[in-house]
Image: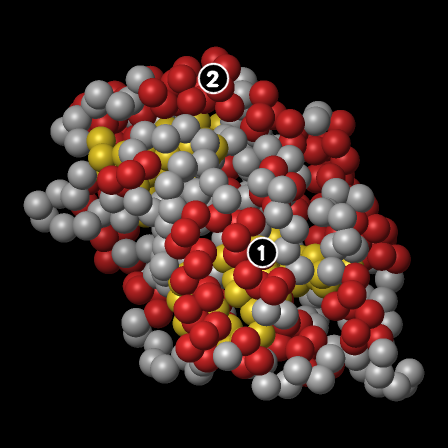
């Protein structure tokens, strides 16, 4: 069947457009655990779309909720008025967020959530009379979306290097990837909690009174599944608290059950001041993001004069009725099917299946927690990412969707996955690794 895409007009995001033109990969349908490509092949979804479709594809309940909402009210303005759905949704979300994070600000994407969280952090410090706290701290290899705030605190060089000076006053903690000491670990790595102590050095260097917030992904996804060493997040929390610095967890990937529990923060027992999310919030069906904010931060904004707009920020589509309808239906599915427990229930089986990959050619490391895995390959002589990209292409040809980032292939299937799918996924993956050599 002929490809229907005309690659001459659409500027594809995050894609080598010229390479794509010679070998297009197009998806046409999605149902349950599978995509169907435009040439009619079934493709097992090993990545929940792009870490979004945690409840699997084509969920009838979401379709119905979206359709009904569209016919009832398609849009409502967000300036000095509202409608009931974001109130309902925020209340539902506060039932599953970590204790004390009960205020919700809605956005349309992970990138917007990150920029919103950074702005809340800066404005909060001002609101409490700490206006000198303007510095932000991210982490090497961190990914926080593509807004200017997100790429400034982010630490993936390719996402930053073409875009000039970015935000001033940003530092980066060291990343926690340490294959030498933690190779083939299952769950959180034993070694590396001390990397959090670098924050003390930055505090000494700049003075705590100048630092507003630290932002990290509890588990880095986009840079190749980098897990927090045992005790690392706790140390970050202790140091930030000691110095009046806010801690932001970017849970755009880890939110909504990916690592077991609703949020990684709960699985690993560390509560930040703000959490960003998106993706799984609507099961990927309608763009939407959110920032969960600690009560005391919100209260500080409410302490000013009654008539003021407390936080001058928002989007035309914040709390969009159709997105809210999709999110409410998604939360119903997660609760009814107990999907946040799924990553814990299947973790052992998932880990055993991964263990069988260890002896395949060119495997450098395997990192896993919940229903996520990062399989890192030895670098290819022709450059970083060459081998993983070859395996990604082979998988796609053989009916499996995986995600290549650098030398790592990331796996993050929908949480509705069954053991038989896990067997199928790893059998296809192992074959593709062998074929790609
Ligand atoms: N933060 C993290 C941790 C992410 O993984 C992503 C997307 N992969 C984003 C932010 C950006 O989200 P979006 O693409 O929806 O803007």
Q: Residue furthest left?
A: 381
Secondary structure beneath dot 2 equals helix
Q: Estimate the x, y position of residue 263 in percent, counting from the top left.
A: 63, 43
- Quadrant in which residue 142 is drawn: bottom left
- Give the label, 2 or 1, closer to the camera: 1
Q: How many numbered marks have been drawn onto this rendered protein structure?
A: 2
Secondary structure beneath dot 1 equals helix
Q: Estimate the x, y position of residue 308 in percent, counting from the top left.
A: 84, 85
Please report whichever mark, 2 or 1, sits nearer to the chain's N-terminal start: 1
What separation in Å lies between label 2 and label 1 (alpha carbons)?
A: 32 Å
Q: Is residue 44 left or right of residue 233?
A: left
Residues tagged 2 and 1 counted as in contact (Cβ below 8 A): no
In the image, what residue occupies the spot 29% across and 58% down? 17
Nearest the viewer among 163 and 102 is 102
Q: The N terminus lies in which quarter of the figure?
A: top left
Q: Is residue 85 left or right of residue 283?
A: right
Q: Estimate the x, y position of residue 156 in percent, counting from the top left.
A: 35, 61
Label annotation for residue 349:
2
Instruction: Please say which color scheme the image uses.
Output: secondary structure
Label annotation for residue 53:
none
Nearest the viewer among 434 and 377 is 377
In the image, what residue occupies the spot 42% across and 32% down? 368
Give the answer, above or below, for where 74 lies relative to 390. below
In the image, what residue occupies the spot 61% across and 37% down? 267
- Quadrant in which residue 113 is drawn: bottom right
In the image, what residue occupies the spot 50% across and 15% down? 419
Q: Is residue 46 visible?
A: no
Packing grade of label 1 (10 A; few <14, some 14-19, many >=20) is many
Residue to which mark 1 is pinned: 237
Packing grade of label 2 (10 A; few <14, some 14-19, many >=20) is some
Give the answer, above or below, for where 169 lies relative to 74. below
Q: The C terminus lies in which quarter of the figure?
A: top left
């Amino acid at each position: 069947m002929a490809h229907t895409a005309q690659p001459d007009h659409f500027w594809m995001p995050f894609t080598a457009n010229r390479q794509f033109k010679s070998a297009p990969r197009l998806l046409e349908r999605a149902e349950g655990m599978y995509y169907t490509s435009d040439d009619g092949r079934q493709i097992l979804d090993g990545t929940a779309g792009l870490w979004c479709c945690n409840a699997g594809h084509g969920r009838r309940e979401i379709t119905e909720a979206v359709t009904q909402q569209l016919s009832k009210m398609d849009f409502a303005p967000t300036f000095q008025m509202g409608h009931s759905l974001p109130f309902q949704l925020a209340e539902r979300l506060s039932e599953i967020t970590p204790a004390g994070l009960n205020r919700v600000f809605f956005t349309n994407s992970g990138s917007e959530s990150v920029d919103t969280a950074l702005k809340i952090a800066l404005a909060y410090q001002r609101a409490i009379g700490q206006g000198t706290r303007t510095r932000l701290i991210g982490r090497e290899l961190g990914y926080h979306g593509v807004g200017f705030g997100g790429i400034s605190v982010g630490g993936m060089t390719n996402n930053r290097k073409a875009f000039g000076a970015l935000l001033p006053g940003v530092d980066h903690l060291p990343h926690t990837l340490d294959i030498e000491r933690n190779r083939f670990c299952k769950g959180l790595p034993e070694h590396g909690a001390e990397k959090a102590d670098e924050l003390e050095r930055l505090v000494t260097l700049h003075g705590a009174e100048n630092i507003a917030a630290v932002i990290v992904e509890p588990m880095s996804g986009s840079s190749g599944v980098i897990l927090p060493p045992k005790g690392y997040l706790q140390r970050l929390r202790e140091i930030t608290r000691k110095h009046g610095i806010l801690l932001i967890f970017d849970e755009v990937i880890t939110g909504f059950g990916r690592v077991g529990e609703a949020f990684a923060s709960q699985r690993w027992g560390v509560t930040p001041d703000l959490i960003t999310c998106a993706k799984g919030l609507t099961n990927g069906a309608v763009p939407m993001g959110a920032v969960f904010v600690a009560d005391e931060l919100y209260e500080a904004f409410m302490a000013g004069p009654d008539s003021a707009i407390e936080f001058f920020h928002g989007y035309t589509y914040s709390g969009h009725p159709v997105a809210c309808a999709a999110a409410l239906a998604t939360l119903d599915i997660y609760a009814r099917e107990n999907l946040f427990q799924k990553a814990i229930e299947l973790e052992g089986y998932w880990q055993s299946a991964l263990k069988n990959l260890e002896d395949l050619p060119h495997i450098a490391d395997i990192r896993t927690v919940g229903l996520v895995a990062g399989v890192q390959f030895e670098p290819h002589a022709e450059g970083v990412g060459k081998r993983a990209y070859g395996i990604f292409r082979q998988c796609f040809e053989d009916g499996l969707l995986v995600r290549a980032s650098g030398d790592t292939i990331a796996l993050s299937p929908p949480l509705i996955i069954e053991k038989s799918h896990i067997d199928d996924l790893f059998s296809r993956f192992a074959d593709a690794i062998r074929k790609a050599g």
